[in-house]
Amino acid sequence: MSEAVIIVAAGRGLRAGGGLPKQWRALAGQPVLAQTLAAFADAPRRVLVVHPDDMAQALALTGGTVTLIAGGATRAESVRNALEALEGSGIETVLIHDAARPLVPHEVIDRVRAALREGPAAAPALAVSDALWRGDAGLVSGVQDREGLYRAQTPQGFHFAAILAAHRAHPWAAADDVEVARAAGLPVAIVAGHEDNLKITYPEDFDRAAAILRARRGDGMDIRLGNGYDVHAFCAGDHVTLCGVKVPHSKGLLGHSDADVGMHALTDAIYGALAEGDIGRHFPPSDPQWKGAASWIFLDHAVKLAAAKGYRLGNCDVTLVCERPKIGPHALEMAAELARIMGVDPSRVSVKATTSERLGFTGREEGIAAIATATLIGG
């Protein structure tokens, strides 16, 4: 059966802290939403429902690999918007999943899919094992029998035509899509859920989710390495800017921005460690606003992007390749300036130089090359 997965990410709740909706907060170096999308990477079609204000951010995250739909005022409205957009596309079954459940194991997804081959609806759940109380004014006012009670999870799966009709007939709010299905008389099979399939709701849930990811990886941290390489030709001038330091020279460096070849290589190394392309992706040379721009703007952006994804700089190493000017007298100042821009201790930053033994364009003093490596640590 042809399938679509709807991931609902239009909420604005801030109970999880961090000043952002929880689906956009970093978890192990990636937004929660990125982790959720990855869990359904094998789906033939993915539909992502986001708040209208998040459309540009969602497009940047997904790169056009999913269908984006604007959410509504309620969860039920958001789901219905996605279902209506899929009508007529040949979809036979649909899985509806909360973006705030990024750790859903694949076996749970497979159990829902298998159940849909036998009936019109299925959803994962865990039997309630704790004693249940009722409370009033901070006191226990009664007990509740836990027999037959379950903790609902997602993805909740349905035959497409049946759940679309159920949503059209259910114009009011609902806790989840099982409630909508049952109101329409659809039988919903229960399949086994998983404790890892937690819904991130409160700040402490991020710690729990990060611990689960560490256990899956078998280690306590996520280490990323990136490298960068850049070249700029000499031109007329009386100085060059290298790693943020103005160095007197008989020539200048040619470039769209300030041509700081060392800082450009380091910036690309950080972007590379994040799998975020290079400077050109984030600051296109075709955009006139970056003409002559100071390169610290690019490096600052890369470092802040790393922090937003949950990473910090472990160390970096920049090698400048040129015959002249001599880098040694300025290397410590350059490392200190890079450290200042990135907000790290100078002991984490290395700047050094080498020549190419008079070989190649650098040996002929036609320009300067730079190689940089950056280590990012997350988790």
Image (cartoon, rainbow, N blue to C red):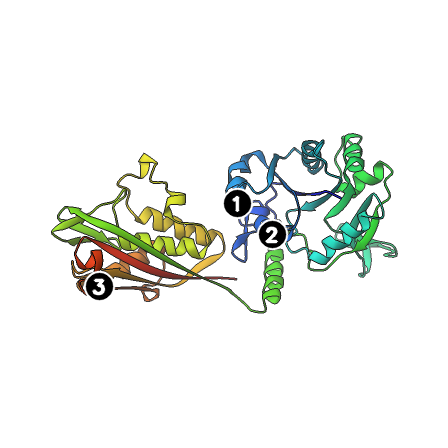
| Looking at the image, residue 355 lies above or below residue 65 | below
| Looking at the image, residue 238 lies above or below residue 186 | below
User: What is the CA distance from the residue labelled 2 to the residue labelled 1?
Assistant: 12 Å
Verify CB contact (< 8 Å) between mark 1 and mark 3: no
Counting every numbered tag in the picture gives 3
Q: Quadrant of the N terminus?
A: top right
Name the residue carrying label 2.
38
Name the residue carrying label 3.
356
Percent from the top left, x then y, of residue 197? 69, 56
Residue in view at x 61 percent, y 57 percent: 204
Name the residue carrying label 1.
61
- Mark 2 or 1, nearer chain start: 2
Disc nearest the viewer among 3 and 2: 3
Q: Amino acid at mark 1?
A: Leu
Q: Amino acid at mark 3?
A: Ser
Q: Amino acid at mark 2?
A: Ala
**Closer to the camera in the image, 358 or 237:** 358
- The secondary structure type at the circle numbered 3 is loop
Verify CB contact (< 8 Å) between mark 2 and mark 1: no
Displayed quadrant of residue 11: top right
| Looking at the image, residue 372 lies above or below residue 80 | below
Mark 3 crowd level (few <14, some 14–19, many ≥20, 10 Å Cα): few
**Closer to the camera in the image, 243 or 114:** 114
Is there any visible trace of residue 136 in the rendered image?
A: no
**Closer to the camera in the image, 111 or 345:** 111
User: What is the CA distance from the residue labelled 1 to the residue labelled 3?
Assistant: 40 Å
Residue in view at x 53 percent, y 40 percent: 59
Mark 2 crowd level (few <14, some 14–19, many ≥20, 10 Å Cα): few
- Mark 3 or 2, nearer chain start: 2
Displayed quadrant of residue 283: top left
Mark 1 crowd level (few <14, some 14–19, many ≥20, 10 Å Cα): few
Residue in view at x 84 percent, y 36 percent: 184
